[in-house]
Amino acid sequence: MIANGAAECAVVFVDLDNFRRINKCFGHETGDNLLHAAARRLHRFVTEQDGLAGRFGGDEFVLVVHGKRDEAALNVLAEQIVTELAFPHHFKELRVSVTASLGIARFPQDGTDAGQLIQYAHTAMYETKKMGGQGFRHFIKEMAADATDSLLIEGRLRQALENNEFSLMFQPIIRAGSTETSIVETLLRWTNGQKEKIAPDRFIPVAEASGLILDIGRWVLHAACRQASHWQQTRTTPIVVSVNASPLQLASPRFCDDVQAAMDAADLPPALLAIELTERLMVEEDAITSANIRRLTEMGVRVALDDFGTGYSSLSYLTRYQIQCIKIDRSFIAEIECDAQSRALVQAIIGIGKSLNVAMVAEGVETQGQATLLETMGCDYLQGFLIGRPVSAAAL
Ligand code: C2E
Ligand code: CA
Ligand code: CA
């Protein structure tokens, strides 16, 4: 189109979310059917006059559209594609749905070279994935630097496990009104070969996008259980160790076996372990995830719902899964002293927890004022810099 003298056009890069899992759960035939169906749906968005659509490889598709498409028009188009692709497919008696992540790059604003435009659209798509998938992003210049960053991180993450570059920090959680630590959350730390510390918010999304999180998560489980078992033998009061698990781990059929193996290896009773799950990235109504959560509870391991209130399905999680603990996201806690609305919201969340008989943890407690308020509101547990920052096991 550029060669033919188009004044403007846009590349829309489309990548299906978690497609590998569709293949794994339903088999390759269903995977292929799904690709065909997705292609047919995509094809309807272009006509011979205004663009073309094609498969780029694997579960990736590219649309090129020309004509007068300003940013607003592209937003509408992208929104429609995201919605259309998310509708469930019916193959025989199977009902399968998959979401898609999109990235958009425009000619001539973002670049003038076709290859570069496709690459930029791909980079923007990857940004959508990092935000949890199902949606779209326009390419911006800053993303290019970020993309090389992600690639660098991914390359180094592969060696990090072998080179023993991971460690765990532990953050205390106390019962409101007491000073005794009853739970500790494990937080993963990575110091790479160059001795740089890389924050989990930067490398965990990369580990998730590349699937490496499964191996890393297994390492975390083993290290956390070993530490918990050590505390059990050396401390007079019991400490529950709470481990963050990626939705990808929860969706893996072997997750509970991994948990059991880690507890067995460390000789840890299940009552001293909790698994924190976040709804970030979680797929709706995932059968394996539900089964895993049920099995964890049967095994005697506690399940906590992390970052409560930040996702779009917090409430439906409470009905769908058996959860023993809710962690109220720190964004709600930050404002409770000065904002009546936040206070009312947190009070209501605590009310939900009480009526469901679920333990409530407030995250991100930074001031004494917040702690006192939360205690009067009936919150069970407090976590945050006021109580204690994440520290090494020895320092706890
Ligand atoms: P998260 O699970 O919400 O963990 C709490 C984060 O909040 C930690 O950041 C902690 O240092 C920080 N924090 C604790 N108290 C306060 C406070 O009072 N104020 C403020 N501003 N922040 C506070 P961190 O260690 O950087 O971890 C970030 C995220 O990385 C975690 O969020 C969690 O989602 C993820 N993560 C950490 N370790 C693991 C892991 O082993 N596996 C997985 N899958 N994710 C992990
Ligand atoms: Ca957590
Ligand atoms: Ca959290």
Image (tube, rainbow, N blue to C red):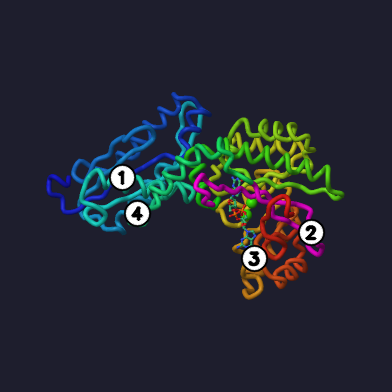
Residue 197 in view in this figure: yes
Q: Sequence order check: which comes first, mark 4 or mark 2?
A: 4
Q: How crowded is mark 1: few (under 14 residues within 10 Å), some or many (20 or more)?
A: some
Q: Residue 333 carries which label?
A: 3
| Three-letter amino acid code of the residue under disc 4 | His
| Three-letter amino acid code of the residue under disc 3 | Ile
Q: Name the residue under label 1.
A: 119
Question: As drawn, is 286 to the left or to the right of 65?
Answer: right
What is the distance, in whole Å, between disc 1 and disc 3 at their CAs? 40 Å
Q: Residue furthest right?
A: 236
The residue drawn where x is 34% and y is 53% is 139
Q: Sequence order check: which comes first, mark 4 or mark 1?
A: 1
Asked if the residue under mark 4 is in contact with the one under mark 3, i.e. CB atoms within 8 Å, the reply is no
Q: What segment carries the magenta color?
A: 168-197
Q: Mark 4 points at which residue?
A: 138
Above or below, 120 relative to 28: below
Q: Mark 2 points at which residue?
A: 175
